[in-house]
Image (tube, helix red, strand yellow):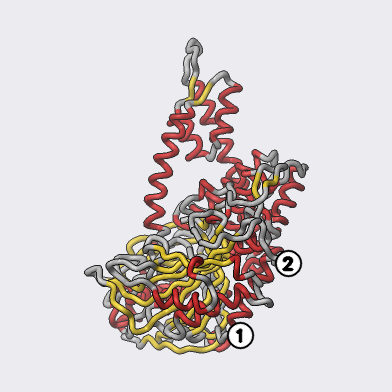
Amino acid sequence: MMYRYNRAAGAGGKSDVSHGRRTFNSGLKRKMKAAELRKKFIQFFESKGHCPIKSASLIPDNDPTCLFTTAGMHPLVPYLQGATHPAGTRLTDCQKCIRTGDIDEVGDAVHLTFFEMLGNWSLGDYFKEEAIRFSYEFLTGAEYLNIPPERLAVTVFAGDEDCPFDQEAYDLWRGLGLPAERIARRPKADNWWGPAGQTGPCGPDTEMFYWTGSEPAPEVFEPEDKRWVEIWNDVFMQYFKTAEGKFVPMAKKNVDTGMGLERVTAILQGKASCYETEIFAPLFAKLDELRHADTPPCWTLSSARIIADHLRAATFIMADGITPGNVDQAYVLRRLIRRAIREGRKLGIEKPFTPELAAVVIAEFGEVYPELVEQAERIKSELEREEKQFALTLEKGTREFEKLIARVPEHVVKKVISGKNAFYLYETYGFPIELTSEMAAEHGFSVDLPGFEQAYARHQELSRQGAEQKFKGGLADHSEATARLHTATHLLHAALRRVLGTHVEQRGSNITAERLRFDFSHGEKMTPEQLREVEQLVNEAIARDLEVECREMTVDEAKAGGAIGLFENRYGERVKVYRMGDVSCEICGGPHAARTGELHHFRIQKEESSSRGVRRIKAVLD
């Protein structure tokens, strides 16, 4: 589930002998930068009646299937399911996304952990005709991307026993001038979205491809030719898959599109990798400064790419309230930071450096994402603390390494560190295999590298299996049980602020139909007396059977009315505010009960640490 720079890497074009890579011919006279692409996309759709909305947090709201926001559609799921969006039925945005399913692959030319996804949305408003026409106009318009039509090709859904060939999309593309030979019919595996679960909204899509070759594009479009690179995807949610596996046409149809900012920027600039664009250039310049070298170019080095990617992702994650820890998002964050530190050592960077890289990210992206600037000092402080802590961990690992080799008798001629032990050093103490091998050689040992690879492969498989559950993405549960538990989190939040103080702020939630999990800012373990008081306050609010009122208003009106706003920068001009009597008033977009009396009885099961400065409560409704 990584963001892949898909068909671009290794595609045709002239060779750059100096770096042993390939470049593309963009076919464009002017090379557009990422900031301009982001701005033009939003302005174009604003001119078509779309309301620009701010990027949602990287931490999903009310979706237990994901640790992070993995796609542009993710935060809009409730509205794709029928809820009314405060900003209307036509929306456009640039959404922050994190995907970590193949985190160990970052460092090549095609993987990113953090990326930005441009999108436009129709929530029961326009459908295929307008969506396709908008896409074509933005791609080919002289004031926009200005791509020559002869460099474009598209795919459409071919049809199967479940749903027919997408004749409408095909005819619309033909009507815009694309020859039949440039429209490929593809199966569900290639041109179909959803449903994310067993049931739900789904439908065909049409994907747009750009010719990157230096020679004219062939007359017949063959998607397998890697010189054709996908740049945009329009999804048409027009069916609902039932529990029986039938695809039923929906009365209210939606459009969801996605264009990867980094990928398209690289393609328009004729680059084989987004690491070669201005997006990453300041990070590589800082790394060259820190390692006191500029050869070979930093962007060609796997270690430098890992550092740039991981610390960019980590900075954005911390800006949304996460601190390094041992579970869930906090664990992923810690892994990103520590892997970046290890790679820094490979580049010869011995002193602490992560805050300096974060400062570059904040300077480059702070204007677009002001939460970076607002959280700048906390981000740098947390990185400094994590880097010091990891240095101690490496020190402990060195001592463990010395214990391992001390167990081998002196008379043994062939001294080997087993693959199992080498992996133990990697997993527990963050020792890269290269470091273990280097230290082993200094003591006359070798390392069982095949054994290490086997242990590592088993670890990856287990991680991927977990990722399929944690990062699969999809439609959040909006059942009555979940709505009641979500309502309970509002009451819990209010009770915590009353018992512990107003410093308490939500740091994340995970709600299923069975239980709620609520993370909040607080530096100390709660006492049994505090937990009992919180539980009592929530149950008193439930017993009062308060009405759960919902009103739409501007953010300023919500603030003036005393509403609590979490991750404030993600909100658009208008928001939904849920009020429960004199107990709770919060900005929120999730499902809710009609009255607090529907919650019956609230019970705290556990209170524990989530990460540094963040506590976690698990609770149920009986």
| Residue 370 percent location from the top left of the image | 65, 71
Which of the numbered marks, if any, corresponds to residue 518?
A: none
Q: Return the residue nearer the eye: 120 or 386.
A: 120
For marks 2 and 1, the one nearer the N-term is: 2
Q: Is residue 619 left or right of residue 350?
A: left
| Residue 390 percent location from the top left of the image | 58, 44
Q: Return the residue nearer the eye: 598 or 417.
A: 417
| Residue 225 percent location from the top left of the image | 52, 54
Q: In this view, does 483 lie to the left or right of 412?
A: left
Q: Is residue 309 left or right of residue 524?
A: right
Where's the C terminus, which quadrant?
A: bottom left
Disc 1 residue crowd, few under 14, some 14–19, many 20+, Cα 10 Å: few
Kind of residue at badge 1: Ser
Q: In this view, does 190 lie to the left or right of 405?
A: left
Residue 365 seen: yes
For image coordinates 59% across by 40% down, the residue present is 392
Q: Which residue position is annotated with label 1?
A: 47
Q: Return the residue nearer the eye: 146 or 439.
A: 146
| Residue 517 percent location from the top left of the image | 39, 65
Direction left: furthest residue: 244
Give the quadrant of residue 549.
bottom left
Alpha carbon distance from label 2 to label 1: 23 Å
Where 257 falls versus 389 (above or below)? below
Could you tell me which secondary element the residue under label 1 belongs to?
helix
For image coordinates 58% across by 32% down, the residue present is 435
Could you tell me which secondary element the residue under label 2 belongs to?
loop
Kind of residue at badge 2: Arg
Disc 2 residue crowd, few under 14, some 14–19, many 20+, Cα 10 Å: few
Q: Which residue position is annotated with label 2?
A: 30
